[in-house]
């Protein structure tokens, strides 16, 4: 029953109940005084109840009855009967009118098989004024409580065994029909039934298994180019995009991203593929993934059967046995996850995605306890939870620890923006290929889903290209627009060197993608184009880039053309909307100084020198984004960081903060008690946090409680890490002490890095 039907019958029931209640009372309390009729006596409650029910049917006992209450009941009963008749007419007429309206619709969206994810996807796509038709059984649709006062969302209750009813519910000419049941086989069967009735029509099929997605055309050639809707793919893309595993690896000084994944199901396999296809950069080695499962043998078999090609694309040892109930409790010597961390030290991220939210929570909390108490498993813990709202994880605010949920059913506008970007840029890349290879050209619309996917995967790699160049995305959906200020392309970046470098990365990514799909390199020597065999998945270009130059130098242009297409799209996006948010070049500035600053502390001179340094290097707010790096100790580290951020904000820029901490903030505040009260430290910390207009992140140098004897050594190590990360360092040395700051500045000077030294009087050295 629809909500409108429930409302109608609810009103009818309310009037009827009111009639019975008032009528019963009236018959039990008859007022016979005015007429003096001896037969006019009040009725007992059971007789009164019966008499009041008769009012609904218009009984003669009410005709010309002198009692006012009875007469009121008579008219109320008539209204109840009329409401019932009109209600029945409304229910049948409304259903008929709704079916007629749907049958005449054109250019609308249709969802066949309603559930949280598929509905969320279409609601995110639906523009104001668009009509959305939801088709499912009465039981499923009655559970949907959408608030739609515009009437743009229509529900069609059908029995799925009636193909004709399903066909009629689609409407005359839908813009797209999404088959959204979680089971791909159900969606394919429904789609085939409708194709037999009405021929081809725009459709999208939901499927969560990549092995089915890759071979969807084997069901029928009808599905050669049908796009896929996949919650797994949306979730994996959002997770990798938000996590930025390569940037975390660079921050933490790792040779490559090291990812641990606990629980090997369809979601884990999707995440492994996403990581394997996106984690490529010349400054980092091959991605390493460790997998763990309570049934390691079955998990490894599943991985080889469904994603066997990933074993070539990714450095991934055999799945190790790990029971969720024991995770984090076996001890350092026996826990395989801790052993994996010991081999790579540290991990980049830990992803917990078993098939149960309860088990995920249990495992994640055990790991979080290990981080806090023993300094083990130091990496962001990403925990799948259907109870969270969106598919994307919470913002990563600590790159060394913390718990972040992901995997909810809701699709964000940002997720759709990345989807559109992939299609738009993928198409542009294909058109460039058509121009370069006219004898093999084929239109975009005639490409199969698999061939389109090759282009859209290349398009998504633009995100990692930008990250490799040190570019920072704007917040939200604008990140997917890949918009760059022309000055960044023409002046800030060395575009020729960037294209050359990224072309190698693009080729490596393409090879990994082919490997993940099960392709292999031809054994012919030398390899030629005629050695390609699409049916047997044999290619002649799956070579290391150096060998590609030797055997197929003319093919290198395809990789560089893809890179050029990215920058062309970035420039086009800017000219289409110059006021839109842009990706910008990151500039990192570190601060280091004493634990106390007096009330007369004046940062004006340093800000002036900082401005000169920016001007000398043509660093502007329209092309760059400032990230201040601070050890986050009370005193100069916080006050100077706030001053720099406030100055940059005043220039119109967006500012980020990276707190490179030797210990927890609470520990640092206690350590500085001889120099600053806790109240002062808290005020400084609050003021710094409030000044940041971008993202604020923490990075612990090491986890767990640090022995007091080792603390200063850890602080000194932090000075070297910070110096390596930053484009500019600002040091302050007071009239007494400051030996570590002086030593850090001397080391910086020996390495030729830019720095400003703040003294009384101030001395500066801008470096080369």
Image (cartoon, rainbow, N blue to C red):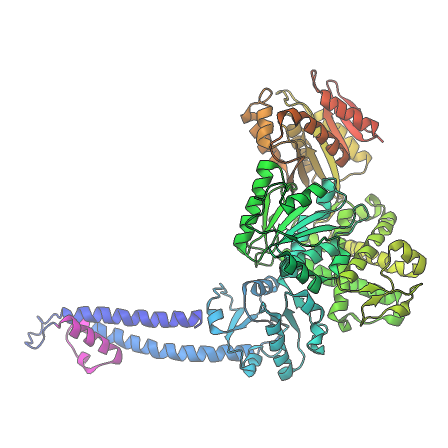
Residue 762 % position (x, y)? 75, 21
Residue 488 % position (x, y)? 80, 46
Classify the position of the N terminus by image quarter. bottom left
Residue 55 % position (x, y)? 23, 77
> What secondary structure predominates along the stretch shown in magenta?
helix
Residue at 40% across, 80% down:
89
Q: Is residue 56 magenta?
A: yes
Classify the position of the C terminus by image quarter. top right
Whether residue 655 is visible to the viewer of this picture, yes or no, is yes
Residue at 72% across, 60% down:
422
Quarter residue 10 falls in: bottom left
Residue 102 % position (x, y)? 55, 77
Q: Nearer the viewer, residue 295 or 245?
A: 295
Q: Is residue 27 above or below residue 619?
A: below
Among all residues in the image, which is located at the extreme front? 334
Whether residue 234 is visible to the viewer of this picture, yes or no, is no
Residue at 75% across, 36% down:
725
624 sits left or right of 97 in the view:
right
Which segment is the magenta one?
43-70
């Amino acid at each position: 029953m629809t909500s409108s039907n429930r409302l109608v019958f609810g009103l009818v029931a309310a009037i009827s109940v009111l009639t019975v209640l008032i009528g019963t009372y009236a018959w039990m309390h008859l007022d016979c005084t005015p007429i003096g009729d001896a037969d006019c006596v009040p009725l007992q409650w059971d007789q009164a109840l019966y008499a009041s029910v008769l009012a609904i049917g218009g009984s003669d006992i009410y005709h010309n009855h002198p009692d006012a209450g009875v007469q009121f009941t008579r008219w109320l009963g008539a209204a109840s009967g009329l409401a019932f008749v009109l209600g029945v007419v409304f229910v049948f007429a409304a259903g008929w009118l709704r079916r007629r309206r749907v049958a005449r619709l054109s250019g609308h969206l249709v969802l066949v098989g309603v559930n949280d994810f598929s509905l969320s996807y279409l609601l995110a796509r639906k523009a104001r004024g668009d009509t959305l038709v939801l088709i499912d059984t009465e039981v499923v649709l009655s559970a949907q409580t959408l608030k739609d006062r515009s009437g743009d969302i229509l529900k069609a209750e059908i029995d799925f065994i009636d193909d004709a009813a399903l066909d009629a519910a689609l409407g005359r000419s839908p813009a797209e029909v999404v088959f959204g049941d979680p089971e791909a086989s159900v969606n394919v069967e429904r789609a085939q039934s409708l194709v037999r009735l009405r021929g081809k029509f725009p459709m999208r099929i939901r499927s969560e298994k990549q092995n089915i997605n890759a071979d969807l055309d084997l069901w029928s050639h009808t599905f050669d180019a049908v796009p896929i809707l996949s919650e797994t793919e949306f979730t994996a893309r959002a997770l990798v995009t938000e996590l930025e595993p390569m940037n975390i690896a660079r921050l933490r000084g790792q040779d490559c991203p090291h990812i641990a994944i606990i629980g090997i199901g369809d979601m884990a396999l999707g995440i492994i593929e996403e990581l394997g296809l996106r984690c490529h950069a010349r400054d980092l080695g091959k991605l390493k993934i460790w997998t763990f499962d309570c049934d390691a043998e079955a998990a490894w078999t599943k991985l080889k059967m469904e994603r066997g090609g990933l074993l070539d694309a990714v450095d991934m040892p055999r799945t190790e046995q790990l029971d969720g109930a024991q995770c984090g409790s076996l001890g350092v010597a026996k826990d395989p996850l801790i052993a994996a961390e010991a081999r790579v030290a540290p991990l980049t991220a830990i992803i917990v995605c078993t098939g149960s939210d309860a088990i995920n929570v249990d495992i994640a909390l055990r790991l979080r306890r290990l981080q806090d108490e023993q300094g083990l498993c130091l990496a962001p813990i990403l925990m799948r939870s259907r109870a969270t709202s969106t598919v994307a994880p919470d913002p990563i605010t600590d790159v060394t620890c913390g718990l972040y949920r992901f995997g909810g059913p809701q699709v964000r506008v940002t997720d759709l923006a990345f989807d559109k970007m992939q299609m738009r840029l993928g198409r542009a890349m294909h058109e460039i290929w058509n121009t370069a290879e006219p004898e093999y050209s084929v239109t975009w619309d005639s490409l199969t889903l698999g061939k389109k996917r090759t282009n859209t995967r290349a398009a998504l790699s633009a995100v990692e290209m930008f990250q490799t160049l040190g570019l920072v995305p704007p917040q939200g959906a604008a990140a997917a627009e890949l918009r760059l200020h022309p000055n960044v392309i023409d002046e800030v970046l060395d575009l020729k060197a960037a294209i050359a470098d990224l072309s190698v990365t693009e080729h490596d990514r393409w090879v990994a993608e082919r490997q993940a799909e099960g392709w292999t390199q031809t054994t012919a020597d030398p390899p030629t184009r005629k050695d390609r065999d699409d049916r047997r998945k044999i290619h002649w270009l799956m070579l290391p880039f150096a060998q590609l130059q030797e055997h197929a130098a003319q093919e290198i242009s395809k990789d560089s053309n893809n890179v050029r297409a990215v920058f062309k799209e970035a420039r086009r996006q800017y000219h289409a909307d110059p006021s839109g948010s842009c990706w910008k070049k990151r500039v990192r500035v570190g601060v280091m100084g004493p634990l106390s600053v007096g009330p007369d502390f004046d940062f004006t001179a340093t800000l002036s020198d900082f401005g000169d340094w920016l001007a000398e290097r043509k660093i502007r707010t329209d092309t760059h984004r400032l990230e201040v790096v601070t050890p986050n100790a009370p005193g100069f580290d916080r006050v100077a960081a706030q001053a720099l951020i406030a100055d940059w904000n005043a220039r119109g820029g967006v500012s980020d903060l990276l707190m490179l901490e030797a210990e927890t903030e609470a520990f640092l505040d206690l350590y500085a008690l001889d120099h600053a009260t806790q109240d002062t430290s808290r005020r400084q910390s609050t003021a710094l946090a409030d000044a940041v207009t971008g993202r604020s992140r923490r990075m612990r140098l090491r986890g767990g409680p640090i022995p007091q004897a080792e603390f200063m050594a850890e602080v000194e190590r932090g000075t070297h890490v910070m110096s390596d990360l930053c484009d500019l360092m600002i040091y302050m040395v007071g009239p007494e002490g400051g030996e570590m700051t002086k030593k850090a500045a001397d080391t910086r000077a020996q390495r030729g890095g830019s720095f400003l030294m703040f003294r009384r009087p101030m001395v500066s050295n801008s470096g080369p």
